[in-house]
């Protein structure tokens, strides 16, 4: 296990550096730059803009810029945002709670509903329920989140006035928990829709694999009730691939939902990424990229470890 | 000279020599404003519908489609940041909707007549109000003014704007409320620049170690009507009423500036009542008709200083020929663009200046959509149709790229209409739109574009000085320091710009700029399409909202806003 961990950590470090090099190069070589937002500012001359570029370090050769950025990163300095001069880690930290709140709610809805639908679909394969669930999943995967979000707002906020039209809480409100939950319902449901489809399809597939195994037949032959067979024997084994899926979901969990956060004016990581990309706020974009890369590597490592814990047949070497 | 004071009832009043905006409205003195707002807006009724509360009451939520992020007003920033500056900070004076300067931190506007500015425009003498306090209670003094100008002049400071300030010399503080300085040369736009220069406190900033990244930006201190409470990044900014404000108001207790990036969502939140006022880009034209029908909302088109143009790169062979620019202008169906694509909201224009400017020339030749005349101009200039219908002259095809910000669907429709218009006269326009970070980077600044569809505010605040956009010394691609990206060079225009900038005689300035507009209308480095009108939306019970074409954001006077009971 120790060898496995050391080997994976070394691999991760190499991958991390590679990702940073590629990300930095792609970001900086892409046309445009952070100075373009000043192009039409009245009274700002070309000389002023060149001076700002110099202060940002943009006039130095790209390898020099990369080395300076990496050197600072290695000592824990993630740089400062070009937009508001705040430390990148503080900027990311200020958006994480909102994203965590939204994503945890959405993932919880997705896991519970998706697994239930997946199990039902597998047990009653080709039944009307299974067909409806399959068609429903395809539709859910096909609906653009942006459109679904706007329709949800139109029906439940504008017409019925049951839910807020967006935001994380009422501006100037009391800050009560209920207010937060009220605002969470629509974005969490919209975001969960796709996730429910994904989890239900994975669960159905995994469950179908398991319930055709010999040990399930044996359990049934022993006379165990079907409920016990499904929940105690089949379900637990079918969950193994779900651990991998959960590992892959970890970066999503903290990376935020780009579209849903925009539609529901949710101040999370997804919107931070879009805004920063739009303004070519290189330090923040690189910060989010590195943060996400770490989570992907961590998520995969955790998934492998959990699989080994859950399934004694897996040996980590 | 006017001092604002509180009367016995606690209501703030002003002296009769300088009545408040509301008093002006009551006296019917705001006819000028109402003329350009249009007869159906009903602002007189709105403004007189109620009286302000005796103490700050309630809250207002301003919705903006961009996020203010820079809270040091002297650092480089963008338009949206000024929505916060107007409420958090004060300038020496501010500019009203008619373009007149109104005292803010000064006791009186310095002029040649009152001796505040010498007749040659070189020596300035400022008298400040003596009752102004920073939000932390420290008195505002002439030392603060000196500190601000010197900070802008500091070569290590990333100043947003240096123009004008660079010319200030020998600042002398005579007393806490009086100071003088000398200008290296007369510069007429400087009063307008000062109306946009929001002052920061010396006693806070002189302690900072890094002048470009001071801690001040996370908890700014100003002299404005509202003081800083908090910023929730990516979401909103909270400002609270400043009790000791030296001017009128504020009448609301809390002002929120809410960031909603998507314009459709912004409108939806206005519909549902989550926000009280839509600022910046306002309501999109396609929602205008629906928005007018919303209950308890006042929705109106508000003129903006921005002019929508086709900018042509006169450095390219195809556009060097004036006949081409002229023919394209005749071949442009401006009315259809305005009526069919922009829902008739903007107004046709021939000038680079907004109609509300004192320097606007209303006598410029009116545009005519006349494809036959366009063809004749091109024929006479030797542009003969080629085998594919595209005209050619001496090996140069009348074919060019037009670019604008990708994803701007309204502009894309206008481009398609123009493409058809110009194909009819033998000019081929290819569309290549780019993301904003690309479009307005070197592609625009270094004149790498061929033609562009662009909305530009050419003025410096209320001042018509457009040296940055038209002077032959402002061509970035040729080493200049301005934004003359069309690479337009004209000796007469250079002369008019120089004349307009150096004289303090308003009549002489008017003549210079009017003549300059005649030249730009004839030479057409920009093919003017229309002056923008933003569809503004406010809740009907919100009193005091007054659009101002001379500022970047219409919450410039939020200190006078209040809710009708």
Image (tube, rainbow, N blue to C red):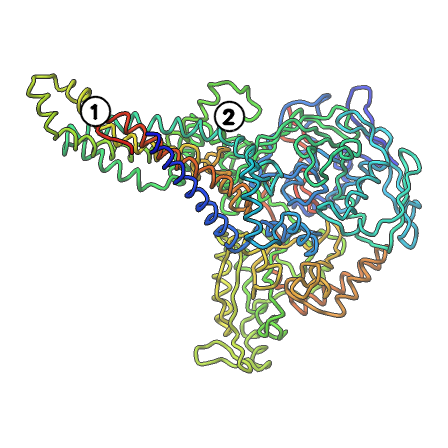
- Residue at disc 1, secondary structure: helix
Q: Specify whether B54 is left or right of A122.
A: right
Determine the residue positioned at 7% across, 18% down: A222
- A275 or B415, which lies in front? A275
Residue, disc 2: A169
User: Residue B347 lies in what quarter of the image?
Assistant: bottom right
Q: Considering depth in this image, is A244 or B289 the residue closer to the camera?
A: A244
Of tags 2 and 1, which is closer to the observer?
A: 1
Query: Which residue extends farthest front?
Result: A3
Q: Position of residue B329 (x, y in %)?
A: 59, 68
Where on the picture, by quarter, is residue B543? Answer: top right
Residue B16 seen by the camera: no
Residue placed at 49% from the left, 42% from the top? A274
How far across and down, in percent of the image, does residue B491 sit?
Answer: 75, 70
| Disc number placed over residue A235 in the picture, else none | 1
On what subunit does the disc labeled 1 rest?
Answer: A
Between A99 and B80, which is closer to the camera in this rendering?
A99
| Residue B396 on image: x %, y % | 54, 78
The answer as to whether the residues below labels 2 and 1 share one chain is yes
Chain at numbered mark 2 = A
């Amino acid at each position: 296990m120790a060898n496995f961990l050391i080997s994976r950590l070394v691999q991760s470090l190499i991958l991390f550096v590679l990702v940073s090099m590629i990300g930095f190069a792609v970001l900086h070589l892409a046309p445009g730059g952070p100075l373009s937002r000043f192009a039409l500012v009245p009274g700002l001359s070309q000389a002023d803009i060149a001076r700002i570029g110099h202060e940002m370090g943009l006039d130095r050769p790209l390898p020099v810029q990369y080395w300076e950025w990496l050197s600072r990163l290695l000592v824990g300095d993630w740089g400062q945002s070009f937009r508001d001069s705040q430390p990148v880690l503080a900027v990311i930290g200020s958006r994480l709670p909102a994203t965590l709140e939204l994503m945890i709610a959405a993932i919880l809805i997705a896991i519970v509903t998706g697994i239930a639908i997946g199990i039902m679909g597998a047990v009653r394969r080709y039944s009307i329920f299974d067909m409806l669930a399959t068609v429903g999943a395809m539709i859910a995967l096909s609906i653009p989140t942006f459109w679904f979000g706007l329709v949800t707002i139109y029906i439940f906020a504008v017409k019925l006035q049951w839910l807020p039209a967006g935001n994380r809480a009422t501006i100037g409100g009391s800050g009560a928990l209920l207010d937060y939950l009220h605002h969470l319902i629509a974005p969490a449901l919209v975001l969960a829709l796709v996730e429910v489809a994904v989890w239900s399809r994975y669960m159905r597939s995994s469950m179908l694999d398991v319930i055709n195994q010999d040990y399930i037949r044996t359990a049934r032959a022993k006379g165990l009730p079907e409920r016990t067979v499904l929940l105690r024997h089949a379900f637990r084994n079918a969950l193994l691939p779900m651990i991998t899926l959960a590992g892959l979901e970890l970066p999503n969990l903290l990376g935020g939902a780009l579209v849903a956060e925009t539609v529901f004016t949710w101040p999370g990581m997804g919107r931070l990424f879009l805004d920063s990309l739009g303004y070519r706020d290189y330090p923040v974009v690189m910060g989010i990229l590195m943060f996400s890369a770490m989570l992907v590597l961590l998520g995969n490592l955790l998934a492998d470890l959990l699989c080994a814990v859950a399934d004694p047949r897996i040996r980590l070497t | 000279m006017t001092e604002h004071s509180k009367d016995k009832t606690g209501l703030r009043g002003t002296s009769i020599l300088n009545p408040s905006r509301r008093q002006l409205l009551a006296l019917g003195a705001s006819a000028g404003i109402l003329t350009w707002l249009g007869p159906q807006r009903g602002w007189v009724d709105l403004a007189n519908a109620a009286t302000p509360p005796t103490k700050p009451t309630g809250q207002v939520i301003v919705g903006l489609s961009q996020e203010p992020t820079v809270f040091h007003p002297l650092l480089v920033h963008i338009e949206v940041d000024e929505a916060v500056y107007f409420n958090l900070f004060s300038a020496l004076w501010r500019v009203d909707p008619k373009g007149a300067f109104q005292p803010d931190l000064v006791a009186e506007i310095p002029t040649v007549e009152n001796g505040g500015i010498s007749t040659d425009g070189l020596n300035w003498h400022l008298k400040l109000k003596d009752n102004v306090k920073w939000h932390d209670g420290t008195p505002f003094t002439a030392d603060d003014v000196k500190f601000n100008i010197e900070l802008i002049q500091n070569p290590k400071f990333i100043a947003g704007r240096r123009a004008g300030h660079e010319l200030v010399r020998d600042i002398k503080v005579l007393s806490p409320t009086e100071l003088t300085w000398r200008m290296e040369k007369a510069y007429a736009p400087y009063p307008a620049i000062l109306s946009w220069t929001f002052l920061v406190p010396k006693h806070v900033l002189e302690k900072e170690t890094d002048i470009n990244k001071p801690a001040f930006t996370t908890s700014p201190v100003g002299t404005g009507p509202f003081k800083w409470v908090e910023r929730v990044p990516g979401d909103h900014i909270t400002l609270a009423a400043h009790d000791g404000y030296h001017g009128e108001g504020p009448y609301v207790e809390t002002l929120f500036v809410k960031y909603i990036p998507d314009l459709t969502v912004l409108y939806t939140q206005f519909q549902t009542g989550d926000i009280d006022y839509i600022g910046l880009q306002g309501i999109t034209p396609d929602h205008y008709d629906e928005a007018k029908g919303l209950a308890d909302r006042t929705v109106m088109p508000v003129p903006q200083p921005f002019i929508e143009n086709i900018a042509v790169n006169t450095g390219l062979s195809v556009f060097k020929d004036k006949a081409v620019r002229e023919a394209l202008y005749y071949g442009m169906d401006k009315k259809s663009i305005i009526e069919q694509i922009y829902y008739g909201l903007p107004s046709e224009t021939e000038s680079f200046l907004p109609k509300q400017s004192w320097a606007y020339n209303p006598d410029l030749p009116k545009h005519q959509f006349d494809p036959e005349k366009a063809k004749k101009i091109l024929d006479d200039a030797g542009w003969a149709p080629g085998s594919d219908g595209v005209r050619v002259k001496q090996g140069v095809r009348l074919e060019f790229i037009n670019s604008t910000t990708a994803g701007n669907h309204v502009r894309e429709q206008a481009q398609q209409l123009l493409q058809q218009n110009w194909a009819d006269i033998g000019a081929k326009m290819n569309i290549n739109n780019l993301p904003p970070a690309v479009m307005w980077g070197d592609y625009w600044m270094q004149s790498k574009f061929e033609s562009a569809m662009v909305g530009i505010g050419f003025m410096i605040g209320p001042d018509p000085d457009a040296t940055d956009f038209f002077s032959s010394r402002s061509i970035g691609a040729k080493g200049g320091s301005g934004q003359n990206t069309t690479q337009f060079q004209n000796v007469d225009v250079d002369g008019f710009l120089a004349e307009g900038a150096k004289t303090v005689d308003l009549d002489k300035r008017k003549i210079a700029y009017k003549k300059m507009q005649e030249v730009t209308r004839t030479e057409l480095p920009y093919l003017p399409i229309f002056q923008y009108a933003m569809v503004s939306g406010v809740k009907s019970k919100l009193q005091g909202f007054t659009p101002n074409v001379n500022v970047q954001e219409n919450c410039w006077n939020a200190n006078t806003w209040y809710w009708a009971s």
